[in-house]
Amino acid sequence: MTQTAPILLWFRRDLRLSDHPALSAAAESGRPVIPVFLRDPLVGALGAAPRFRLGLGLEQFAASLAGANSRLTLRSGPALETLRALVRETGAGAVWWTRAYDPESVARDTEVKAALKADGLDARSFGGHLMFEPWTVETKDGGFYKVYTPFWRAVRGRAVEAPRPAPGRLPAPDAWPGSERLADWRLGAAMDRGAEIVARYAQVGERAAQGRLGHFMAHVVAGYGESRDRLAEDGTSCLSENLSLGEISPHQCWHAGLRAMEEGKAGAETFLQELVWREFAYHLMHHTPRLTSGNWRPEWDAFPWSEDAGAAKVRAWQQGRTGIEMVDAGMREMYVTGRMHNRARMIVASYLTKHLMTHWKIGLKWFEDHLIDWDPASNALGWQWSAGSGPDATPYFRVFNPVTQAKRFDPDAAYRRRWIAEGQRTPPEPARACFEAIPRRWGLAPGDAYPAPVVEPAEGRKIALEAYENRDF
């Protein structure tokens, strides 16, 4: 029975057909394959922008499956309960999925696997979201890496499995189980009017991701070592949006980067290092799950950050109205596009945690709600790195000066003009679009006067350094 019974293929953050180990194994088995996506409590807990982007991705992925002689079954409910119901309906003998690594998913998947195996089913998890499983990269002493550079050296020469092609057709069951309607899930509802604005900038699905990668390798990667920090340029891959939902695999990106290196494109190795930074974030999250929820360095629990999420200074930061153009431009880019340039992320994070002396967890949750490329490991590591509380962190006393950063990485103010409407006679469309995307209750308009700084850079640096020097650890 189990040799011919259907396989339930549970999709999560792996919405692609190519280079998908679980999908390839299911297709090669010759057994009927039933792709499933569950709106379980973890999906319900996603922030507004990630949930909205997931809806776009599922719509595109369902169309891709239809082109492969298959379909996507949608169900709501707790994972174990819902999978068991599908097994009863379909007579499935196996449930397979791609591994996840955040603490909540690990707890869910561990319970699901044990229970389904006890039911006599073939419950199996596969790799595919990472190039290097976190437990396979060890120091000479058998521990895990806590600093990026040694981690990079440990994996840079490792063989990365070649990407698998997409199966042409997936074996279909004799009868398909019933499916809920994606539109009824209303995954974009919390975005309100911002959904229409952000959707203009999203590049959704596997085909779009491959196109992005191809464009980057052909036109951008050669100068990536420098262009990735120039805020106004098209100098990055923008693939974080697609990697987040698995619309492209890191293996595909890695091998494209290797080919670019062989072709003599100077920025290719830097691109590979950025892919490994993502791996490093997952490595740390696996070994120290507290990365996502508390100070990685426990001594920072005593640091006098404010945890008042409703404070006026936090509200100014959230609204992109700190009076510091570099900070405000980054926040507004996020509201319009659902993404933020990485250099801007470091600047806005440093300003919140140091100049405004506000706990990084407040910023982490805000990004979790507003980024369509939200990733649990990268978001957590990025915030803790900027705050100084994490592994491989920038020292707390290294305070990003947003004015100096602007002069260096946006010297002609093109990035700031693109996103800040106030003070411009004819603001560009992206700057105006911010006021169409943000909540109406904020009561902001392009013609408003630009605010004075909430905290001047020099004053904020002084406050941060005094707090650091007077710390209790």
Image: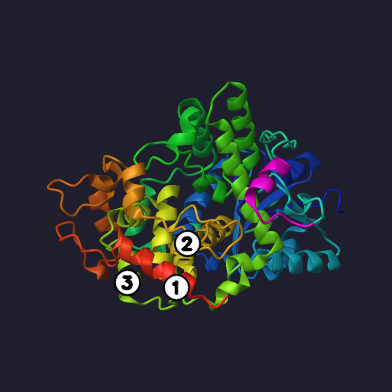
SS at mark 2 in the image: loop
Relative vertical location of residue 282 with respect to residue 202 in this rendering, above or below? below
Residue at 43% across / 60% down in the picture? 350
Magenta stretch, overall SS? helix
- The residue range painted magenta reads 143-155
Q: Quadrant of residue 16?
A: top right
Relative vertical location of residue 403 with respect to residue 203 in this rendering, above or below? below
Q: Is residue 27 magenta?
A: no
Residue at 30% across / 75% down in the picture? 312
Where does the C terminus fall, quadrant-wise?
A: bottom right
Give the amino acid at mark 2: Phe
Relative to 19, 238 lies left or right? left
Residue at 58% across / 63% down in the picture? 390
Q: Position of residue 332 (x, y in %)?
A: 32, 55
- According to the image, label 2 marks what residue? 397
Q: Compare residues 113 and 144 and report the one nearer the observer.
A: 144
- Quote the CA–CA distance across marks 3 and 1: 18 Å
Identify the residue at the far top of this view. 263
Give the amino acid at mark 3: Lys
- Quote the CA–CA distance across marks 1 and 2: 10 Å
Residue at 15% across / 49% down in the picture? 424
- According to the image, label 3 marks what residue? 313
Q: Position of residue 338 (x, y in %)?
A: 40, 53
- According to the image, label 1 marks what residue? 467
Q: Position of residue 340 (x, y in %)?
A: 41, 51
SS at mark 1 in the image: helix
In primary-sequence order, the first of circles 2 and 3 is 3
- Quote the CA–CA distance across marks 2 and 3: 21 Å
Identify the residue at the far left of this view. 425
Disc 1 crowd, CA 10 A, few/some/many (<14, 14-19, 20+): some
SS at mark 3 in the image: helix
